[in-house]
Each structure stands twice: as structure tokens, then as C-alpha cells.
Image (spheres, rainbow, N blue to C red):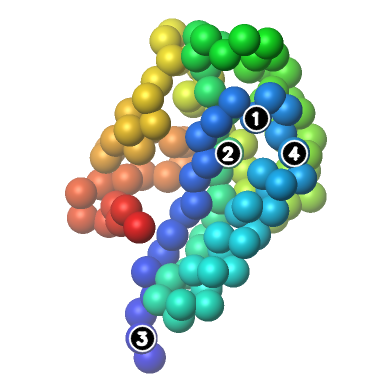
């Protein structure tokens, strides 16, 4: 049997507010990767941007995180991670993805990180 490459899907953004289409995006991506026969999606992570991002009308991160958690309450595989929004400064996505850090519960290292 062929070994599937494990994936965790990540979406960084303002989620101001989170919408049904944000959640649908995860489902479509998961279905696509599963259909290739090469990947197994193990989870999804929504990472709301820091308040210092500078987007006009950006609701406070604590409220965007709360809305996202409510929206994903029934999801067994998509979670909200507040690491990015809790930093002192706005972080570029590459920093969120940097090997060896950032998303709680998901360790990316040189040997296992895959960019697709």
C-alpha cells in the first residue's frame, strides 16, 4: 500500500468576518488532495491576522477569533489558532510557516514540511 503524505491545511487572513466560503475553501481543498491519492489531510487551521495588519475597519483580533471559533464549533478537523494574532507585530505568512515554529500543535521541520 502506498504511503500517503500527511497534510495540514492553513489559511492566514483577516477573517473579518469569517464566512461560509472560508470554511468551504477548506472542504474543497481537502477533497482535491484526497482525490489525488497522494495526500491525507489531517486537519485545517485558520490563523487570523494581527491587529497591526493595518486593514481599514479590521475588527479586534479577539472578536475575529471568537467568531471563527463559533463558526467552526461543529468542525472536527478545522481549528482556529491565535498565535499569529497574539504577536506584538503583524507577521508575514512566511513567518507563520517558518520551520520549527509557530502554529500550536503543528510542528513544521525541514524533514517533514511540504509546500504544495
Q: Secondary structure at mark 1?
A: loop
Report the front residue among 112 and 9: 9
**Which mark is drawn over residue 2?**
3
Spatial CA distance of label 1 from label 2 is 9 Å
Spatial CA distance of label 1 from label 3 is 37 Å
The residue indicated by pointer 1 is: 15
When the figure is inspected, residue 39 is found, relative to residue 61, above or below; the finding is below
- The reply to whether residue 75 is visible in this rendering is yes
Q: Which quadrant would the N terminus be assigned to in this image?
A: bottom left
Residue 11: give x, y in percent of width and height. Answer: 52, 41
Label whose residue precedes the other's in the sequence (4 or 2): 4
Residue 40: give x, y in percent of width and height. Answer: 48, 69
Spatial CA distance of label 4 from label 2 is 12 Å
Q: Secondary structure at mark 3?
A: loop
Q: Residues within 10 Å of mark 1 (few under 14, many from 20)?
A: many
Of marks 1 and 3, the one in the foreground: 1
Q: Secondary structure at mark 4?
A: loop
> Residue at 62% across / 43% down in the picture?
79
Of marks 4 and 2, the one in the foreground: 4
**Furthest-front residue in this view:** 56
The residue indicated by pointer 4 is: 19
Left or right: 31 in relation to 92: right
Left or right: 24 in relation to 114: right
Amino acid at each position: 500500500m502506498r504511503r500517503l503524505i500527511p497534510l495540514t491545511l492553513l489559511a492566514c487572513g483577516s477573517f473579518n468576518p469569517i464566512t461560509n466560503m472560508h470554511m468551504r475553501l477548506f472542504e474543497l481543498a481537502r477533497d482535491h488532495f484526497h482525490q489525488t491519492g497522494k495526500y491525507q489531510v489531517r486537519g485545517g487551521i485558520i490563523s487570523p491576522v494581527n491587529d497591526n495588519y493595518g486593514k481599514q475597519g479590521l475588527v479586534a483580533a479577539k472578536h475575529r477569533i471568537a467568531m471563527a471559533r463559533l463558526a467552526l464549533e461543529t468542525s472536527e478537523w478545522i481549528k482556529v489558532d491565535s498565535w499569529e494574532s497574539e504577536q506584538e507585530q503583524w507577521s508575514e505568512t512566511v513567518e507563520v510557516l517558518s520551520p520549527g515554529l509557530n502554529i500550536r500543535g503543528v510542528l513544521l521541520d525541514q524533514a517533514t514540511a511540504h509546500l504544495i
